[in-house]
Amino acid sequence: MQETKQIPIIDLFAGPGGLGEGFMVLKNKEKKSVFDIKLSIEKDINAHKTLTLRSFYRQFVKKNKSVPQQYYNALKEADLSKREVLIEEMLDNYDEGYIARKEARLIELGSKTWTAKKVDQIIKDQLKGNKDWVLIGGPPCQAYSNVGRSRVGGINKEDHRVYLYQEYLRIIKKHKPAVFVMENVKGLLSAKVDNEKVFDWMKRDLKVSNNYEIHSLVKPVSKDSDFLIKSEKYGIPQKRHRVILLGIRRGYSHKGEYLKEKTEVTLKSVIGNLPKVRSGLNRSFTHYHLNEVYRNGKPKRLYKNLPDTSENWLKEMSKNIKQIKLWGELELNGLANGPKEIEFGTGAEYLKSNNLISTSHILKDWYTDKRLKGVINHESRSHLTQDLMRYLFASLYVEKHNRFPRLNDYAEHSKDLLPDHANVASGKFADRFRVQVPDKPATTITSHISKDGHYFIHYDPSQCRSLTVREAARIQTFPDNYLFRGTRTAQYHQVGNAVPPYLAYQISSIVYNILKS
């Protein structure tokens, strides 16, 4: 393959584009983009919008052209509705917008609307006869998740997500990429349907039916677990463990090159310099209704709404600090004299700020963009006032013990700290409230972060909240100028489902060296 020729990429089940982002960052000796994404397929409308905007941005970067100021103007618009108008107008007014919309496609693979014939034609049109191309992506992984399987009592063989890999396989068989990179959750290694391991099917189908050699990205393969990548070993600030297969078509050869381990990157080093924001307030539990019950037989809970003001937040924090003082065991440190008002309040979709990461940080250039002059997607979610007490307790507990408390630790201090939840007594989710420890990589960012923040509590007691979208994006190694579109819930969901771009960047170098041969 000629080194000056860009290598086409097709990205299936693309999500917000984390895997593709990493590949598009790679440059050759002439400082030119090595890869070129020709098609990104995603079914979620908000992730598709994110993909489209990022594709627009990349059209300029890959040509070494300056990204237009309109892009940054849109990112700096804090009103979601106005921002969407600015983005769509920008896409309408640039040729690069047309290209981006042609590349990022809103398609549900395996659906009746998008038949194999339609999808094949789109892929064929975008590849334009090129035989040496790369397929990236991974079928939806919720069906293989260990937690998901335990809740439903194993994998349901009728779950179409289990078999979406067959569509991925069909595309490999039909279009024959030179290399493919397929990502999935750790649970894939043990998942079974009708007592047969799903992972064995995949390896057999890929190798025998499609003439591919299947490799690990971290070591020579002697057992299934060798396909597991522990992201924290490769400079990602989270303990994200995922299965990634590297498929190489016969005719190309593996060079024995693997991901190189890097210095561990801690959580605090990547989010500690972001602007401080406080938790939002929404409501407070008052009492149980004596005459009404929910369907599960539990008494109905009654709440009162609480205006989300700085004054109310300071009152709630003061009350909680006073209670913790009475327990005596935890050190309040900077909160001993009460809470302090936080300048940026609950944050916003754009906050003007400087010095967002240490100038000596290994990923400084990866994250930052001087033209942004601030931070996007950095707004806290609102919490139940009773949860604020749990968050404050948990973050102070981490400061003292360097580990997050389990539910029994809450109970030892006060039964009022225990959530009113059916699973509390069973101990099934003993780590329901999980503070992220600052001097270690974070735990895995997942799509569950879109539902509540209990597993993703910020370590700083003075902020007393769960992580913002931007903090989660930093942990996932998305650049700061990577805007997640849609509602805040949709933004969280996109970030949680993504592949860390910095990990993808390291993988892309291995793929490039295979194709250069």
Image (spheres, rainbow, N blue to C red):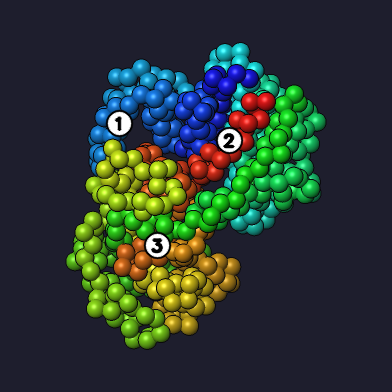
Closest to the camera, between mark 3 and mark 2, is: 2
Quarter holding the C terminus is: top right
Location of mark 2 (residue)? 509
**For mark 2, does the 10 Å Cα neighbourhood hold few (<14), some (14 to 19), or many (20 or more) residues?**
some
Q: Is residue 310 visible?
A: yes
For the residues marked 3 and 2, what is the alpha-carbon distance in whole angstroms? 34 Å
Q: Quadrant of residue 184?
A: top right
Q: Position of residue 205 (x, y in %)?
A: 76, 33
What distance separates the C-alpha of mark 1 from that of mark 3? 30 Å
Amino acid beneath label 2: Ser
Which of 452/480 is in front?
Answer: 480
In the image, residue 449 above or below residue 174? below
Picture coordinates of residue 314, whole percent (x, y): 23, 69
Which label is found at residue 458? 3
Q: How many marks?
A: 3
Front one among 369 and 316: 369
- Identified by mark 3, the residue type is His
Residue displayed at 41% across by 78% down: 416
Residue at 46%, 64% (x, y): give it. 439
Query: Circle 3: is it few (<14), some (14-19), or many (20+) Cα within 10 Å?
Result: many
Q: Residue at x 41, y 52 (%)?
A: 361
- Secondary structure state at the residue bearing disc 1: helix
Q: Residue furthest left?
A: 311
Quarter of the picture containing the N terminus is top right
Q: Nearer the viewer, residue 25 or 471?
A: 25
Residue 281: % across, % down: 29, 61
Q: Earlier in the sequence, mark 2 or mark 1?
A: 1
Residue at 41 percent of width and 57 percent of height: 269
Residue 54, quarter of the rendered image: top left
For badge 1, the amino acid type reads Tyr
